[in-house]
Image (cartoon, coloured by chain):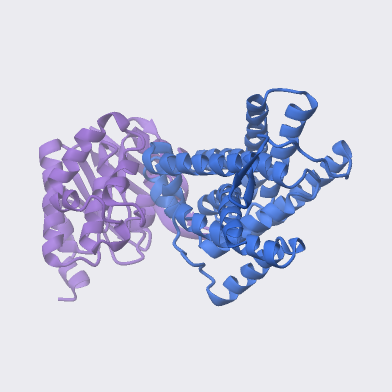
């Protein structure tokens, strides 16, 4: 079953076009990675799913057309978003940040808090710490946790490893894998870290200058392109 | 003399905090200065005057009517002006200032330009040693503290209150948490109107009702935001006390005519010396 379907998406920033005819399908229960160099339009694509850009084309989620829908409504339909740089609430504590994430899902707060603290014990230990004073890794965890507080069917994560130490990256990857395998959560993740993306995803899209250049399983993509050479400079 | 300044300064500061908080909230959430804010105070005063003094309604009912007039006018300001000028703070500031001047003219037309004196909400005078304090200002300060405490609980303990703080800290973060910032703006403008109107009833009983009475509270509110830094209810509270005490000291020791002047001087000094205010952090 297709959970998210994007067809011929064009996105504009003023007169500049950031995405050109992007199409992408996400099957329920899978992890889809979007890779590509800085400025390829990964964040723009993810922002568009949440209704945060000026866009043309069609986006459907769970059988509903969400192309023209407001962000708040899209979240209510079941999309959780952990955006680039988190967009956390700096002068709220960890727990309060999570509670804001539950704004649209107040009946499941206790269960969701327990779930998030189970995934990230470090957040539970520092519930009162203001997010402005957190480390990069903790902030990424909090951002994921906040997105999970709305009990999403689809979790969208923008560059989860940006600026994080390798050990923390592995921790984050393990959590994403667990969520996917144990709860069947569908995940769309954008990454510049190709290894990270390839190790997680069942489907990979390569985005370049606002266009989808290749798509397929990680093996397909490794064969089609010498990605290692292009993106690792090896 | 010292004890008199202490008591009066403390009482006045509570009211100033209430005057400022409605203005600060709008600034935190929308990053605009609502220069029509003084009108909510004036409207609160005139509505209470009409209800309690002209129509002879009970104090409590008159109070509620004043509060509702503030809510209504706050919502109108948002729906008719601010929402349409979103993303353009300068346009919002110019148009709200014009709105204030238009409302001043409307008040002159309806009520004549001459000042009216308001009866105190509560009558009587209390004496503490050599200092006498009216029951009315005691009530004003008491109500201010209660309202501020309730507001603090509201923004810290309720989902809606947290959503208001969320929008003030990171609008996009709020959006992707399922919060509609426009609804939050509506709530904030309505609430700001209510707070202004409540403060206005007491402000009018302590000074007088006249069509220019919106200017002084507006300056006080601007000063609290600038001295206290963006947002922070606590910062605002402290700033309100700095201003309240400065004013009490100058009006008691030097001349009553200096009311407001010291406050304006303080705005300029703080802007030049520490532009982020004393407690500048972008929080509510």
Q: Name the spot of residue A54 as percent of width and height, x first.
A: 49, 50
- Residue B152's place in the image compared with B52, above or below, is below
Q: Nearer the viewer, residue B207 or A113?
A: B207
Q: Name the spot of residue B267 as percent of width and height, x first.
A: 62, 67
Q: Residue at x 71, y 60 (%)?
A: B259
Q: Name the spot of residue B79 as percent of width and height, x first.
A: 64, 39
| Colour seen for chain B | blue
- Tell which chain the image draws in purple: A
Question: Can you see residue A112?
Answer: yes
- Residue B180's place in the image compared with A160, above or below, is above
Question: Can you see residue A8?
Answer: no
* Residue A2 horizontal side relative to residue B263, left or right: left
The image quadrant that residue B202 belongs to is top right
* Residue A104 horizontal side relative to residue B151, left or right: left
The image quadrant that residue A65 belongs to is top left
* Residue A180 horizontal side relative to residue B222, left or right: left
* Residue B265 horizontal side relative to residue A74, left or right: right
Q: Residue at x 22, y 34 (%)?
A: A110
Q: Name the spot of residue B94 as percent of width and height, x first.
A: 71, 56
Q: Nearer the viewer, residue B273 or A24?
A: B273
Query: Most extreme residue toward the front, as rendered?
Result: B129
Q: Nearer the viewer, residue B254 or A172?
A: B254
Q: Residue at x 17, y 48 (%)?
A: A124
Query: Looking at the rendering, in which quadrant would you find the N terminus of chain B?
Result: bottom right
The mark total stands at 0
Q: Nearer the viewer, residue B99 or A226?
A: B99
């Amino acid at each position: 079953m297709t959970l998210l379907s994007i067809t011929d998406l064009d996105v504009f920033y003023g007169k500049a076009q950031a995405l050109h005819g992007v199409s992408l399908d996400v099957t329920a229960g899978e992890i889809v990675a979007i890779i590509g160099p800085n400025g390829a339009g990964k964040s723009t694509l993810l922002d568009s799913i949440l209704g945060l850009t000026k866009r043309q084309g069609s986006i459907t989620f769970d059988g509903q057309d969400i192309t023209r829908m407001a962000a708040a409504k899209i979240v209510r339909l079941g999309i959780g978003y952990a955006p680039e740089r988190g967009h956390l609430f700096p002068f709220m504590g960890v727990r309060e940040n999570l509670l804001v994430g539950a704004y649209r899902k107040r009946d499941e707060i206790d269960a969701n808090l327990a779930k998030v603290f189970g995934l990230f014990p470090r957040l539970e230990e520092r519930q009162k710490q203001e997010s402005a004073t957190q480390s990069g890794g903790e902030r990424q965890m909090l951002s994921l946790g906040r997105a999970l507080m709305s009990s999403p069917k689809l979790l969208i994560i923008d560059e989860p490893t940006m600026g994080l130490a390798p050990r923390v990256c592995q921790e984050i990857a393990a959590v994403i894998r667990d969520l996917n395998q144990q709860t069947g959560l569908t995940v769309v993740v954008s990454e510049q870290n190709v290894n990270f993306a390839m190790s997680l995803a069942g489907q990979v899209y390569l985005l370049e200058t606002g266009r989808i250049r290749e798509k397929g399983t990680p093996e397909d993509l490794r064969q089609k392109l010498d990605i290692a050479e292009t993106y690792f400079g090896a | 003399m010292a004890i008199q300044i202490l008591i009066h300064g403390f009482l006045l500061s509570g009211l100033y905090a209430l005057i400022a908080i409605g203005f600060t909230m709008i600034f935190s959430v929308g990053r605009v200065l609502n220069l029509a804010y003084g009108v909510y105070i004036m409207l609160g005063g005139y509505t209470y005057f009409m209800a309690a003094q002209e129509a002879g309604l009970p104090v409590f009912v008159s109070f509620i009517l004043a509060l509702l007039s503030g809510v209504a006018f706050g919502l109108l300001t948002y729906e008719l002006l601010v929402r349409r000028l979103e993303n353009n703070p300068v346009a919002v500031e110019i148009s709200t200032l014009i709105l204030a001047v238009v409302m001043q003219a409307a008040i002159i037309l309806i009520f004549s330009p001459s000042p009216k004196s308001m009866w105190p909400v509560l009558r009587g005078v209390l004496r503490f040693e050599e200092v006498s304090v009216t029951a009315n200002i005691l009530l004003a300060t008491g109500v201010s503290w209660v309202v501020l405490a309730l507001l603090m609980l509201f923004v810290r303990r309720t989902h809606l209150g947290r959503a208001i703080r969320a929008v003030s800290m990171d609008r996009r973060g709020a959006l992707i948490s399922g919060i509609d910032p426009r609804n939050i703006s509506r709530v904030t403008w309505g609430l700001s109107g209510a707070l202004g109107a409540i403060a206005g009833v007491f402000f009018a009983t302590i000074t007088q009702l006249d069509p220019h009475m919106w200017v002084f509270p507006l300056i006080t509110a601007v000063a609290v935001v600038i001295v206290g830094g963006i947002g922070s209810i606590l910062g605002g509270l402290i700033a309100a006390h700095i201003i309240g005490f400065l004013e009490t000291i100058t009006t008691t020791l030097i001349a009553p005519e200096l009311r407001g002047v010291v406050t304006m001087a303080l705005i300029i000094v703080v802007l030049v010396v520490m532009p982020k205010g004393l407690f500048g952090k972008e929080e509510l």
